[in-house]
Amino acid sequence: MLIVSIYDKKAKSYVLGLGLARNSAIAVRDFSQACTNPESNFNKFPEDYELHCIGEFNEESGKIKQDKDIIILTKAELFVESKKKED
């Protein structure tokens, strides 16, 4: 499983702790739902937020693996812009 977190570029820190996702597609889908909610800060300030994969969790062994590089899975602004185009 992937270990994901949301990075706030203005605060220069990770917010809302860590989450687990079976794969990157599910992580991106869940993040996109939060970004298209008009009440969320992700929607109000989309340029500030990115979804990062910060490691992997092995369900069988309980071990956590972290690569040297953080992987940016997506950015909030991509979902807010596409939602506005649909409306």
Image (cartoon, helix red, strand yellow):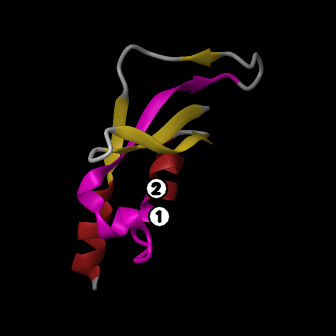
Element carrying mark 2: helix
**Residue shown at 68%/22% (left/top)?**
58
Crowd rating for badge 2 (residues with CA inside 10 Å; few <14, some 14–19, many 20+): many
- Could you tell me which secondary element the residue under label 1 belongs to? helix
Task: Name the side, left or right, on which 63 lies relative to 38.
Answer: right
Q: Residue 35: where, in percent of width, then height? A: 40, 64
Q: Which residues are magenta?
A: 32-58
What residue is drawn where x is 52% and y is 57%?
30
Q: Residue furthest right?
A: 60
Residue that numbered label 1 is attached to:
34
In-front residue for pair 20/24? 20
x and y, in percent, of residue 48 in the image: 28, 53
At horizontal 32% and vertical 63% (from top left) the residue drawn is: 79
Image point 56% across, 42% down: which residue? 17
Kindly indicate whether the residue at mark 1 contacts the one at mark 2 (C-beta within 8 angstroms). Answer: yes
Residue position for label 2: 31
Taking 87 as reference, is 2 left or right?
right
* Left or right of 75, for residue 4: right
